[in-house]
Structures are given as structure tokens and as C-alpha cells.
Amino acid sequence: MDTQESLILEELLEVDIDLITTNPYQPRRYFNEGELEDLAFSIQSVGLLHPPLVRRVPDANRYEIISGERRYRAAQLAGLQKMQVLVRSSSNSHSAQAALIENIQRVDLNPIEIAKALHSLVEEFGFSQDELAQRIGKKRSTVANYLRLLGLPKNIQESVMKDVITMGHAKAILSLEGDEKQNLLHELIVRDGLNVREAEETALRIAEKAKRKALVYTDRDFFLEELAEKIQAKLGTRVLIQGKGKRGRISIDYYSFDDLDRLLGIFGVGGDP
């Protein structure tokens, strides 16, 4: 702990809840409404057991949360007019760093929220990955893996945030280069319910197939792509047209037997022999 941190003073005060503001560096962006309601009920029943940590905002009669925004929101929901807070003497810069580091350590953030918090510490405050690993009590490789998540396409990041796929799935997706292959694996994981091991094996197959794809279908044909989009709109499913010269292939995806029957109906073909 450096000299600046060792001289930090804290005091317990009761303040008007309207004088408390949230911290722009709070990494959590999503608060579960059901959990907030449960916590609000607990606060109404037994009081606030662990006061949020705040700092005084210079030149203003206000307090900014360093950690404990969930408790603050629940206290608002519980109808509290005043609440106890632990006031820390802290600068703007130190408050921002503390908000990020303490929330990473204490709060059950999703992996993307952790990744964004770590990225802020690297970009805005000059932390190295080794320093971050020491501060939050994790291995340097873990910090690196979190930061790599921010290189995923936005739709895949969204799946990680919403717990549609796990951190393990995301690492398997990151083993592939390029949005196209990453989105393909993501689609297969979600569609087929692949576990992490299966996702890793599928990633290897996709990578191997990509290596061999000095295949026939290398040149992009914008006419065929436009034609595939028109067929997709007509059929309501993914269509791929690949061609070279006068020959080619049309691939039409279906996602269940019912979906197959629907497509067969469009083509006027009965499903029964």
C-alpha cells in the first residue's frame, strides 16, 4: 500500500439520501430488479447492515459512491430519506480507481463488465496487467483473458453479458480469427447448446476447414450474394450460394424438423415418402 493510500481517512455519517450521487466509473451497468427488491425488503426489516463507501465531492455538499451502488439503489427503493455511509477522504483519480478495483473484487459482475473496468484502469490510469492482477487478486493470464473479450464482435459480447454463453465459450470463440468464423462458432454454440469442450472441438474443426479452404469457392460473387439474400427473404432462413464458373452449390439451413417441413411446403415437396 503506498503512502497516499495509507493516509486515507474514513468516518461513518448519516446523510440525506438525495445528496448521494453515483460514480461514473461504476463498472456494473445492469442491476437485477428482483434482487434490488429483495434487498430493499431486507433494509426495511433489519436496516442497512453494510453502509456504502462514498467520498465528498469537492466544492459541493454532495457525496459520490465509491462502492455500494446496489445498496444505495435498494435504500432508495425502500423509501429511506437518510442513510449511513462510510465517508472516505479521496481524490477524484483515487476515487475512480477505487470504484473500479473494489467493485471488481466485491461485486458479482458479468465478464464483460469486468473486462471494461479493467480496460479503464489500463487506458485511463496506466495500470499494467501485472499491477491489475496483484490489485484484484487474480493471475495475469486471467486479466489478459478478460481484456481479450472486448475484441469479440458486439453481438457475442452481448451473449456473454446476458449469460447466454460462458467465459469458457468465449475463450473457445477467441481461438478463431476473424468475425466470420467467430460468429459461426457462436451461432453453433447457441443453436446446438454446445458445452465448452464441444465448443473447443468445433473451433478446431472450423480452423482446420478454413485452412483447407483454398477450395474451389474462393472468389466473392456479389451477384450470387445478392441472389442469396433474396432467397433468404423468401424462405426465412439462412441461404448460401457458392459458385465458380458455371457450377456451384446452394445451401439452405433448417433448425428443426418442423422448420424442414415448412421449407418442404414452400417447395411443394411432401415430407412423407
Image: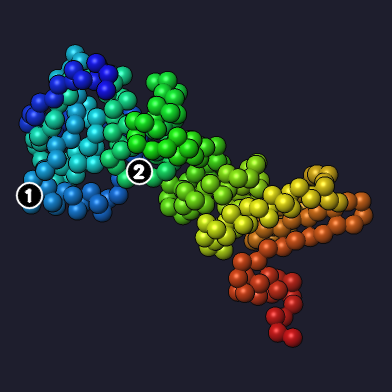
- The answer to which of marks 1 and 2 sits earlier in the sequence is 1
Q: Quadrant of residue 71?
A: top left
Residue 109 badge: 2
Q: Nearer the viewer, residue 98 or 260?
A: 98
Q: Position of residue 151 (x, y in %)?
A: 55, 37
Quadrant hosting residue 231: bottom right
Asked whether the viewer can see residue 209, the reply is yes
Question: The C terminus is located in which quarter?
Answer: bottom right
Q: Residue at x 20, y 51 (%)?
A: 37
Packing grade of label 2 (10 A; few <14, some 14-19, many >=20) is: some
Q: Residue pushed farthest right?
A: 246
**Amino acid tagged 1:** Val
Expressed as whole percent of the image width and height from the top left, the position of residue 227 reads: 77, 52
Left or right of residue 45: residue 175: right
Check the image and report above or below for 265 versus 24: below
Give the alpha-carbon distance from disc 1 to disc 2, as whole Å: 26 Å
> Label 1's element?
helix
Q: Amino acid at mark 2?
A: Leu
The crowding category of the residue bearing disc 1, from other C-alpha atoms within 10 Å (few below 14, some 14 to 19, many at least 20), is few
Q: Residue at x 58, y 48 (%)?
A: 173
Query: In this rendering, would 120 be left or right of 39?
Result: right
Is any atom of residue 16 visible in this view?
A: no
Residue position for label 1 = 46
Residue lying at 32% horizontally and 45% vertically, measured from the top left: 108
Residue 188, position in %: x, y? 60, 58
In the image, residue 25 lies at what x, y percent?
Answer: 33, 29
Q: Which quadrant is the N terminus positioned in? A: top left
Which of the pair 105/14 is nearer the observer?
105
Q: Nearer the viewer, residue 41 or 186?
A: 186
On the picture, is 48 further left or further right than 158?
left
Whether residue 183 sits left or right of residue 222 in the image: it is left
Name the residue rendered at 40%, 33% in the picture. Answer: 133
